[in-house]
Amino acid sequence: MTVHFVGAGPGAADLITLRAAARLASADVVLYPGTYLDDAVLAHCREGARLVDTQDLDLDGIVAELVGAHGAGLDVVRLTSGDPSVYSAVAEQTRRLDDAGVPWDVTPGVPAYAAAAALVGRELTVPLVSQSVVLTRTQARSTAMPETESLAAFAATRATLVLHLAITRTRELMAELEGEYGADCPVVVVHRASQPGEQVLVGTVADIADQVEAAGLRQAAVILVGRALARDGGESWLYAGSRRREIRPV
C-alpha cells in the first residue's frame, strides 16, 4: 500500500481536487489536522474509515500511525491543510517513511493564500507593480528562520508578501514593513478562508493591526501585503493589442 499525502485545500469541502476526493473515498485510514480543517471535508471519506485527528500528536505519533496502517495493508491518507508544498511537514514525514521503507505520493491542493486572494478578488501579481510573491512566515514559538530569510530582506523587494503563522505578531510586523511598503499600503487578512466563520479584514499597514486585535484573531489566518492588492498598475504585454501575434498554420 502507499501513503497518500493529500492537500485538503483551505477548508471548504468543495475546494478539494477530484483526485483528493477519490483518495478520501477509498482510504481505510485518514489522518487530518483538526485545528485547521472544516469537518465537512471529511464527508468525502467512506463510511467506516478510521479518522485520526493529528492536532494532539507529535511527529513520531503521526508517522507511527502511517507506518502501522501501511503494515496492516490499509489504504491511508494523510491530509494537510492547503497545499502540501508549503508548511505541511511533508519533508519530515517522508524522510521517516523512506527510512521505514514505506512508499508515498503527494496530491496537491488549493493553498490558503490563493483562497484568500480569491475572496477579495485580487491578483497578487500586477504588471509594473509586483511580479513576485513571497511566501514566508515569522518566528515566535516556532522553528528558527534561516538567517538569510529576514522579513526586512524580503520587504526590500517590495514584492507581494504572504505571511503565514504570523497573525499574533501583526502589529510588530506592520511596524517593520512600513518603511518599505508605506503606511497606506493595502493589507488583507483572511481567517479560515472558505470555512464557516471565515473573516476578511481589509485595511492598510497603518490600521490592520487594530482590526486584527479587535477581531481577536489568534490562529488560522493569512496576511497579504502589497501594492498589487490595490489593482492599480500597468497591463500585461502578453495581452496587448500592439503585440504582434503570428498565425501558425494548422
Image: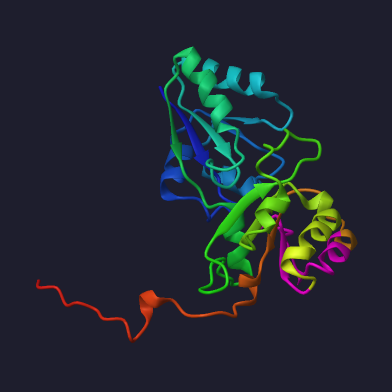
Q: What residue sits 69% from the left and 57% below the top?
A: 155
In magenta stretch: residue 52: no
Q: Where is residue 54 in the image (x, y as percent from the top left)?
A: 67, 30
Q: Position of residue 10 (x, y in %)?
A: 60, 52
Of residues 208 and 1, the one nearer the viewer is 208
Q: Where is residue 218 in the image (x, y as percent from the top left)?
A: 82, 50
Residue 11 can be seen in this image: no
- State left or right for residue 143 relative to residue 86: right
In magenta stretch: residue 204: yes
Q: Where is residue 216 in the image (x, y as percent from the top left)?
A: 87, 56
- State left or right for residue 106 relative to residue 208: left
Q: What residue sits 16% from the left and 77% below the top?
A: 247
Residue 205, by quadrant, is bottom right
Looking at the picture, does residue 59 appear above or below residue 148?
above
Looking at the picture, does residue 65 appear above or below residue 229?
above
Residue 43, by quadrant, is top right
The mark tally for this picture is: 0
- State left or right for residue 65 relative to residue 101: right
The N terminus sits in image quarter: top left
Looking at the picture, does residue 127 appear above or below residue 221?
below
Residue furthest left in the image = 250
Residue 217 can be seen in this image: yes
- State left or right for residue 168 relative to residue 88: right
Q: What residue sits 44% from the left and 14% below the top?
A: 101
Q: What residue sits 72% from the left and 67% below the top?
A: 181
Of residues 104 and 12, the one nearer the viewer is 104
Residue range highlighted in magenta: 184-212
